[in-house]
Image: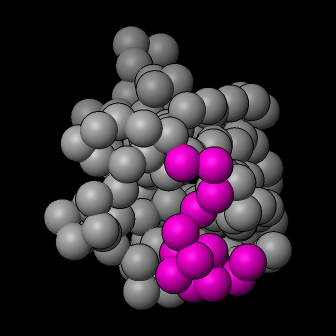
Amino acid sequence: MGTSYETQMTVAFHDLDPLQIVWHGNYLKYFDIARFGLFSSVGVDLYAYMLDQHYVFPVTRSSLKHIVPLRAFDQFICRATVTECHYKIAINFEIRKGPDHLLCARGSSEQLAVRFPEMEMEFVIPERIRIALGG
């Protein structure tokens, strides 16, 4: 696959925990921002797809490995890379900070196609989305 998207962000004060590092749940928020940036960059609007084609794409699996903490006002890049988009949409994520691109976190997610409102799982990603993501 290999379709990728990068977004630059800055840690906001409200993303910190009492230890003054980014609260662990916010890394998934950063991944989500990169995921939707990736979809947008290839012309995929999952909300419009739900309304027009009656499919939803829930996240069914996610993982996250914390390596180096992000701190207040750190500037970082979150990169999302498609690794599969035939039976599921699988994406790998990396968060890197600073001029040396220090690896702070790594993760992944999987999404399935589900027919809506029936909530019936499909066993293939719709062709239009598959092609847009490079599959």
* Residue 120 x %, y %: 42, 38
Q: Which residue corresponds to the image point at 54% horizontal and 48% vertical from the top-left? A: 122
Residue at (47, 73) in percent of width and height? 39
Q: How is the image coloured?
A: one colour
Residue drawn where x is 55% and y is 32% of the image: 60
27, above or below 4, in the image: above
Q: Is residue 130 magenta?
A: yes
Stretch of the chain drawn in magenta: 122-135
Residue situated in front as seen by the camera: 135 or 80 = 135
How many labels, in total? 0
What is the x, y in percent for residue 135?
A: 73, 78
Q: Is residue 100 magenta?
A: no
Residue 30: horizontal and vertical position, in percent?
47, 49
Of 79 and 41, nearer the camera is 41
User: In the figure, is residue 118 to the left or right of 109?
Assistant: left
Q: Is residue 84 left or right of residue 35?
A: right
